[in-house]
Amino acid sequence: MAARAGTGNRTFSSRLVFVVVVLCAHPVFFFAQPPHVAQKIDTYLEPYVQTGNFSGAVLVRQHGRTVFQKAYGFADRERQIRNTKATRFHVASVSMQFTAAALLRLVDEGAISLDTHVAEFAPGVVGGDKITIRDLLVERSGIPDINELTDYGDILQHHQTPATLVSKIEGRPLLFEPGSKFLHEEHSAYNLLALIAEKKTGVPFSGAVDRLVFRRAKLSSSGVDDDSMGSAANMANGYEPEGVKGLKRSTAIHWSAKTGNASVYATVGDEAKLVDALFLGQLLSKSAREALLDTSPRIGYGWFRGESKRFNETAYYMNGRAPGFASFVMYLPKEQTTVVVFSNIYSSATTGIGNDIAAIALGLKYAPFQAASQASKGEIKLCGGSFRFGTDFYQPNAMVTLVVNGPELSLRWPSADISALIPVGRDHFVDRAYWEEVEIERGPTGCPSALVYGHFRGNAADNPAQ
């Protein structure tokens, strides 16, 4: 993914309570809707679809029954081919669930153990004599991350294999002692797990996952994209936001460059089957399932795991973004509820959508979208400037610039990536790409003195004390 925060996965504790610009002529309001859950979900999604912030498919299962499944928008906007229940999406970091499941199946078969050291498979990885497969699966290995390399953009433009991906971080020093902490999403850890799967099965990673996971869990519409697919049927094209309202085709990448961490494609139906197979079925042994269910550490086996105040129970969820796509999946074991949201728009809106849909399905509170007008030109003229964030920001000490482009406002990140801002009130916006709240604070002169991004605050670079 494009580097704004160094990772494609963002964890949101609660749904952002905002209003957005609704482009349809007749906005739909929550309070006018009938009580049926499916109708509420459909109504809730409509403003996202109408504003170009969601296109994809959604599925909800409760107690073994599908209570909602529907597709929205276009799989191919240029040819006006709509998404359907059969549409296959690249699922970004949700791919880690499939990789982890394959490795746990190898553990169940006795081919490896969670305590096997990775030096056996990749002797060039520094610290491989201390890093275990368990460390890789819970992303506490300490190996440097391939997504942070300066030439990562070039890596995405060429065919890769697990071996070539692992070679990119060989010889580089560890970031911390293996097993001691979680620093950020370890994409390279899952590249290395893909290499281990290849070496233990003797077949390419795509074939290994097919044997160990897809066929066993009866996932007939899923696969690993190793660049050999060509024009496969029912595959969604990927798009990204362009300005506040528009969409454009995402830059094409070689999905093999994300092998193990973001190379899987699937339907929402197949993802729901995987959840059933992992948590309720016979895909894994009892001991392997216990490792998956263990909430310490909080991140592991392709899932965030922990207590949710909103749902008053342990929640297992994962989100992801990769060029042109975004994904979210949640499983709530006490309620036996699964929510899957796959989108072929490069926007983190899927995380808030998924959490809200779970709330709707469970009869809990949620925040619907409401219409709002664009910010006035007078407000936007005062919004330009650069802001310095602290060491705890997604990119430590980042300088983020507010850019005025006619009636629209955007953020320019140190990577030169641009995020359009959707106005939702005076000096309040939503970052369209990352779906994060943005607020401008003004000093006595009326000029911006600070930029609040989520719970982070950056001071105006030219006058930090204003």
Image (tube, rainbow, N blue to C red):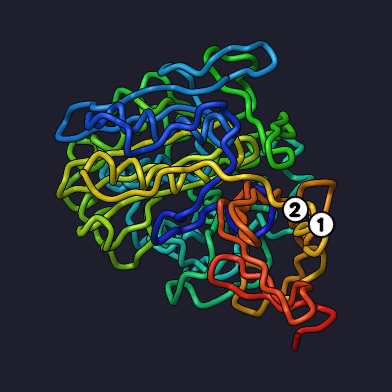
Q: Residue 436 is drawn in which quadrant?
A: bottom right
Q: Residue 115 is drawn in which quadrant?
A: bottom left
Q: Residue furthest bottom?
A: 465
Report the residue marked by disc 1. Answer: 403
Is 203 placed above or below 321 here?
above
Q: Where the C terminus falls, by quadrant?
A: bottom right
Q: Residue at x 62, y 70 (%)?
A: 452
Is 464 placed above or below 167 here?
below
| Residue 220: x %, y % from top left | 37, 19
Q: Residue at x 19, y 35 (%)?
A: 62
Label 1–label 2 contact, CB within 8 A: yes
Using the numbered discs, state the Cα–Cα distance from disc 1 to disc 2 in whole angstroms: 5 Å
- Dot 2 falls on a residue whose secondary structure is strand
Report the residue marked by disc 2. Answer: 410
| Residue 407: x %, y % from top left | 79, 46
Q: Residues within 10 Å of mark 2 (few under 14, many from 20)?
A: many
The mark that comes first in sequence, 1 or 2, is: 1
| Residue 50: x %, y % from top left | 55, 29
Q: Residues within 10 Å of mark 1 (few under 14, many from 20)?
A: many
Q: Is residue 175 left or right of residue 106?
A: right
Q: Is residue 19 left or right of residue 381?
A: left
- Identify the amino acid type marked 2: Ser
Q: Residue at x 50, y 36 (%)?
A: 91
Is 449 placed above or below 228 here?
below
- Identify the amino acid type marked 1: Val
Is 400 placed above or below 101 here?
below
Q: Residue at x 63, y 29 (%)?
A: 238
| Residue 344: x %, y % from top left | 57, 31
- Dot 1 falls on a residue whose secondary structure is strand
